[in-house]
Amino acid sequence: MDLLLSEIKKCTECEKFLALGPRPVLAAHKESKIVIIGQAPGLAVHKSGIPWDDKSGDNLRNWMNIEKQDFYDATHIGILPMGFCYPGKGKSGDLPPRQECAPLWHDKVLSKMKQVRLTLLIGKYAQAYYLQDQAKNSLTETVKNFEEYLPHYFVLPHPSPRNNIWQAKNPWFKKDLIPQLQEKVQEILGE
């Protein structure tokens, strides 16, 4: 695994498309029990090199009811974004994750992670890639029907503070989904 992660950290596959250059940000260990597959690092994460080192990460850890020390322990949590590098700024937020990373690296990394019990698919890019035709017509529908994807996948919206309006419009998310997510995370990490 260490050799593979070292190879990924040196990846320049899409360098010409990255305004700030490549800086792959991920975490994985052969003993990871939960894998988080999100979108791509934001600017703050690009600068720090630490996955989910921003407000979105704070929200995600709150949703999971997990402390930073466990979240950043790769024997517990593996982090594989759809795009490993910051894709740059778009008109209304960051650009979508680069499409090269997941097909190039995900299977190689996941094949070494034999202890994974749950994969969190965060946002439409991860859900479209992994669920394919099993995803619903909208992210809201997919997340509302989260139980259909268990026990392997737990689908979530992006935890960005920009999604607070979405959460306010969908009170079932905090009432029904979050308690089940927290219970599942605690069950897996407690083993």
Image (cartoon, rainbow, N blue to C red):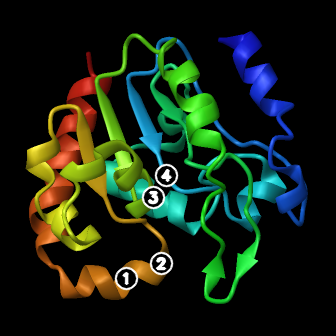
Task: Label 3: state its secondary structure.
Answer: helix
Query: Crowdedness of circle 1 by 10 Å Cα count: few (<14), some, many (20+)?
Result: few
Kindly identify the amino acid type of the residue bearing the numbered disc 4. Gly
Disc 2 target residue = 161
Q: Residue at x 20, y 28 (%)?
A: 187
Q: Residue at x 35, y 53 (%)?
A: 127
**Which of the labelled discs sits on residue 164, or is there none?**
1
Which of label 4 and label 2 is nearer to you? Answer: 4
Where, by quadrant of the figure, is residue 60 drawn? Answer: bottom left
Q: Earlier in the sequence, mark 3 or mark 2?
A: 3
Count of labels in the image: 4
User: How far is mark 1 from mark 4, CA to CA?
Assistant: 18 Å
Q: Nearer the viewer, mark 3 or mark 2?
A: 3
Q: CA distance from mark 3 to mark 4?
A: 8 Å
Give how far across and how far down residue 9 sits, in percent: 80, 32
Which tag is nearer the camera, tag 1 or tag 4? 4
Is tag 1's residue or tag 4's residue first in the polypeptide sequence?
4
- Nearer to us of marks 3 and 1 is 3
Determine which quarter of the picture holds residue 76.
top left
Q: Position of residue 22 (x, y in %)?
A: 85, 49
Task: State how far apart marks 4 and 2 are (Cα).
Answer: 15 Å
Disc 3 + disc 4, Cβ < 8 Å: no
Label number found at residue 125: 3
Residue nearer the viewer, 75 or 85: 85
Instruction: Name the amino acid, label 2.
Output: Pro
